[in-house]
């Protein structure tokens, strides 16, 4: 395979990706490739990545514990700062214990692969994150996909699996759609079937629920989900992830999660930064309210410009375009006008479900968001993209009827 030919093919299909350079810290506005822009594609949801207290905590940790942990968690890499953050995260989300991982990807892959039992079955929402899908693949057990948020389909698959160990996995907030899973119903199906339930709350933790405790807490399910995975690299503005669970489950993961056992422990500055960000979240829960108010303001501004936004109820607001090439062109036209948005294209989504994914931060102003909506409308007109309904509605058209067979495992973008 000629890699350059393949790269040229990806460019022609609108699927080529490149790394852009941001100068300075993360924030609602950055200097991108030398040009100031408004950022609508960052997961720094609460604006804490560059908060002075978070910076200072990370700097002090580097001086006290060093830049890196130097070892895996199971060897010499677990420091007092790791244990402190695990205790405070568990307390915050109402769990007995929490286990730190190096990233959300490592957490999901490790948790799913560790908890899936030989001879068992994993049932996964067809739009779950690539890391959950890859965890299913690493587990080497049968995996079946249920139609997105279709509880009748999930219940039917759960009934049909009687007599086998069952693990159900889902995102809480779907990262490219902005919708929230029907967690109460999923938990009830898991209870009736005696299944374990893993919920990836990466985009809900710090953004939804009482005090920002996440989508699981918003659904009133604290203590009722076997493992809740949360990110330190989104709302908390740091890096890493955690699995909140019962103490026995935490000990099991510390023994069987390969991505934990075979990875260097998270660096102390990132862990200390997350501790400071968590303290800020506890002290300033109004940041969560501001985030949701900003998301509503952006949806309203987009609707005023003719874009549909049905489906998104969170800080993630997708605009359905359909094909990858116009999605890319729309984002490029918006960037020329100073708005940095993200095109989401296959294989992250289905071939006909490309969209522009907008992510709101609490540190945006409503005027900035209204201006961004106007820029996006002008950019859409420039490239000939008609304002469209949002991705959760439009993408449903691409879901093929369930044929009773295991659905393919989606791969990461």
Image (spheres, rainbow, N blue to C red):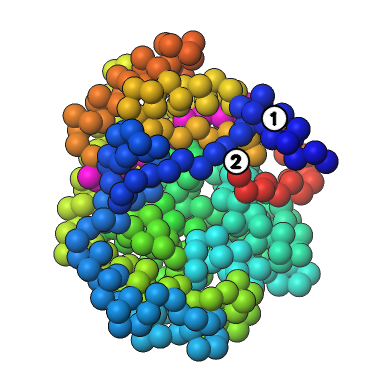
Residue at screen point 36% across, 86% down:
80
Q: Position of residue 56 (x, y in %)?
A: 22, 68
Mark 1 or mark 2, which has the lower sequence index? 1
Q: Can residue 174 be seen in this view?
A: yes
Q: Where is residue 191 in the image (x, y as percent from the top left)?
A: 54, 65
Task: Please tell me in which quadrant of the rendered image residue 333 appears.
Answer: top left
Q: Position of residue 197 (x, y in %)?
A: 55, 64
Number of marks present in the image shown: 2
Residue at screen point 76% across, 72% down:
118
Q: Can residue 215 be seen in this view?
A: no
Marker disc for residue 52 = none
Query: How far apart are labels 1 and 2 at the CA level?
Result: 19 Å
Left or right for 108, reference 332: right
Q: Mark 1 points at which residue?
A: 8
Task: Please tell me in which quadrant of the rendered image residue 111 appears.
Answer: bottom right
**Nearer the camera: disc 1 or disc 2:** 1
Q: Mark 2 points at which residue?
A: 348
Q: Which of 147 and 41 is in front in this view?
A: 41
Residue at screen point 20% across, 65% down:
53
- Is residue 361 part of the magenta span, yes or no? yes
Task: From this view, report whether residue 399 is shown above or below residue 44.
Answer: above
Task: From this view, report whether residue 337 is shown above or below residue 345.
Answer: above
Which region of the structure is painted magenta?
351-363
Residue at screen point 66% across, 24% down:
12
Q: Nearer the viewer, residue 291 or 381?
A: 381
Q: Which of 342 and 122 is in front in this view?
A: 342
Q: Residue furthest front?
A: 34
Quarter of the figure that contains the N terminus = top right
Instruction: Give the secondary structure at mark 1.
Output: helix
Left or right for 319, reference 337: right
């Amino acid at each position: 395979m000629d890699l350059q030919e393949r790269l040229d093919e990806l460019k022609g299909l609108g699927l080529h990706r490149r790394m852009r350079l941001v100068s300075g810290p993360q924030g609602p506005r950055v200097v991108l490739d030398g040009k100031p822009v408004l950022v609508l594609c960052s997961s720094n949801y609460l604006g804490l990545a560059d908060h002075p207290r978070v910076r200072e905590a990370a700097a002090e940790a580097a001086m006290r514990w060093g830049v890196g942990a130097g070892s895996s968690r199971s060897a010499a890499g677990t420091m007092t700062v790791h244990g402190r953050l695990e205790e405070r995260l568990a307390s915050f989300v109402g769990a007995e214990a929490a286990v730190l991982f190096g990233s959300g990807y490592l957490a999901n892959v490790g948790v799913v692969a560790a908890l899936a039992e030989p001879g068992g079955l994993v049932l996964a929402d067809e739009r779950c994150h690539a890391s959950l899908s890859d965890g299913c693949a690493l587990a080497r057990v049968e995996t079946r996909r249920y139609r997105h948020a279709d509880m009748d389909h999930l219940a039917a698959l759960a009934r049909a699996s009687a007599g086998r160990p069952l693990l159900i996995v889902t995102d809480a907030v779907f990262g490219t759609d902005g919708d929230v899973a029907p967690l109460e119903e999923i938990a009830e199906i898991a209870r009736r079937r005696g299944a374990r339930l893993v919920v990836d709350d990466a985009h809900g933790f710090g953004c939804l629920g009482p005090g920002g405790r996440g989508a699981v807490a918003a659904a009133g399910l604290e203590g009722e989900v076997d493992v809740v995975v949360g990110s330190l690299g989104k709302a908390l503005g740091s890096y890493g992830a955690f699995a909140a669970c019962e103490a026995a489950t935490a000990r099991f993961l510390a023994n069987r999660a390969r991505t934990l056992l075979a990875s260097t422990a998270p660096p102390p500055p990132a862990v200390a930064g997350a501790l400071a960000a968590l303290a800020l979240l506890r002290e300033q829960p109004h940041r969560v309210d501001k985030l949701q108010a900003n998301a509503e303001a952006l949806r309203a501004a987009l609707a005023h410009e003719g874009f549909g936004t049905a489906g998104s109820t969170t800080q993630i607001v997708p605009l359905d375009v359909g094909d990858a090439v116009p999605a890319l062109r729309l984002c490029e036209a918006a960037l020329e006008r100073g708005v940095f948005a993200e095109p989401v294209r296959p294989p992250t989504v289905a071939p006909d479900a490309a969209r522009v994914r907008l992510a709101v931060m609490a540190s945006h102003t409503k005027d900035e968001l209204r201006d961004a909506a106007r820029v996006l409308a002008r950019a859409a007109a420039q490239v000939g993209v008609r304002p469209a309904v949002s991705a959760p509605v439009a993408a449903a058209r691409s879901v093929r009827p369930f044929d009773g067979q295991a659905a393919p495992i989606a791969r990461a973008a």
